[in-house]
Image (cartoon, rainbow, N blue to C red):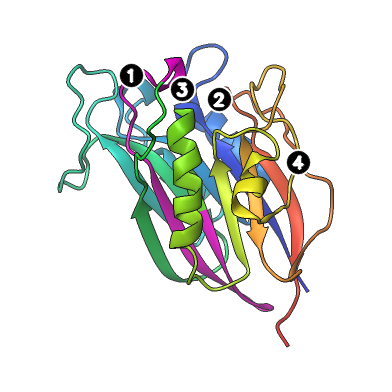
Amino acid sequence: MWAMRLATFNIQHGLGPDGRCDPERLAEAVRALDPDILAMQEVDRFQPRSGFADQARICAEAMGAVEYRYVPTVAGWMSAPGLRWRARGRERYPAYGIALASRLPVRAWRRWRLPMASRWVGPAQLGVDEPRVAVAADVETPSGGFTVCATHLSSRLGNAWAQLPWLRDALGSAPRPLVLMGDLNLRDGAPATVTGWRPLAAARTFPAAGPRFQIDHILVDDDGAIRVESEARAPGTGVSDHRPLVVDVTLRPRD
């Protein structure tokens, strides 16, 4: 059996309750979680509001990751009008997106851009939604390999309900066991109902100051190969309007 700690954390560009984005405070929050694999959402890269920090790198280094991937959803200054929703080719362009970091070796990486497919129109659907993406890693352990996928679904309810089954289908050929982690913007048991996958962690994560519901999730599609070893936690960190979701698991060796 291989023991590991899984965590997902919407870091809200490292924003603290004092209104500051302190890179050392963000790094310390990740060190305290001590994850083997960490999914991150709302991650800034070279943005003025967060001190031009490369937050994915800060978090990856804080946890001792051997590999990580940053996948931008927005290119451009987050505080500027007329923001362009497209990636650019320069290495140090300002961006905002998601990341996945691992202490374990990764055999392959994949990514997807999620659809904006909602036909529902209502108050929660008003405004411009940002693009959404997912990134997956084929991870190697002494007990065998598995897939872990990180994402951040739309805050527009109709889009989130469309994106989750789309991503489930896109991951259909990925090696199992498969772990999905992220801010899914769907409450409590809804993601398990939509996907048919088993939740590994149940804890209220939002809002951070007094969590009332769970919108951050860790799910698994397997045959019982991944076992939960302790009750999931959603500790306070002093960073973000979300709490991280953390669970310790073991992976059963393949026959």
Q: CA distance from mark 1 to mark 4?
A: 31 Å
**Residue 240 image label:** 2
Give the quarter of the image for residue 125: top left
Residue 15 on the magenta segment: no
First in sequence: mark 1 vs mark 3:
3
Front of the two marks 2 and 4: 4
Q: Amino acid at mark 1?
A: Gly
Dot 1 alpha-carbon crowd within 10 angstroms: few under 14, some 14 to 19, many 20 or more = few
Of residue 70 and residue 227, the one placed in the foreground of this image is 227
- Can you tell which quarter of the image residue 144 is in? bottom right
Report which residue position mark 1 lands on.
Answer: 127
Q: Amino acid at mark 3?
A: Cys
Closer to the chain start, of discs 3 and 2, is 3
Task: Give the CA separation, mark 4 to mark 3.
Answer: 28 Å
In the displayed structure, 120 sits above or below 35; it is above
- Label 1 and label 3: CA atoms lie apart by 26 Å
Residue 239: x and y, percent?
58, 25
Mark 4 / mark 3, whichever is N-terminal: 3
Q: Secondary structure at mark 1?
A: loop
Q: CA distance from mark 3 to mark 2?
A: 9 Å
Identified at 20% across, 39% down, the residue is 86
Camera-near label (4 vs 3) is: 4
The N terminus, quarter of image: bottom right
Q: Residue 170 in the image: state x and y as whole percent.
A: 43, 61
Residue at horizontal 58%, vertical 38%? 9
Q: Which residue is label 3 attached to? A: 21
Decide if residue 240 is in sight here. yes
In this view, the mark in front (3 or 2): 2
Q: Name the kind of residue labelled 4 in the image.
A: Ala
| Disc 4 target residue | 202
Q: CA distance from mark 2 to mark 4?
A: 19 Å
N-terminal label among 2 and 4: 4
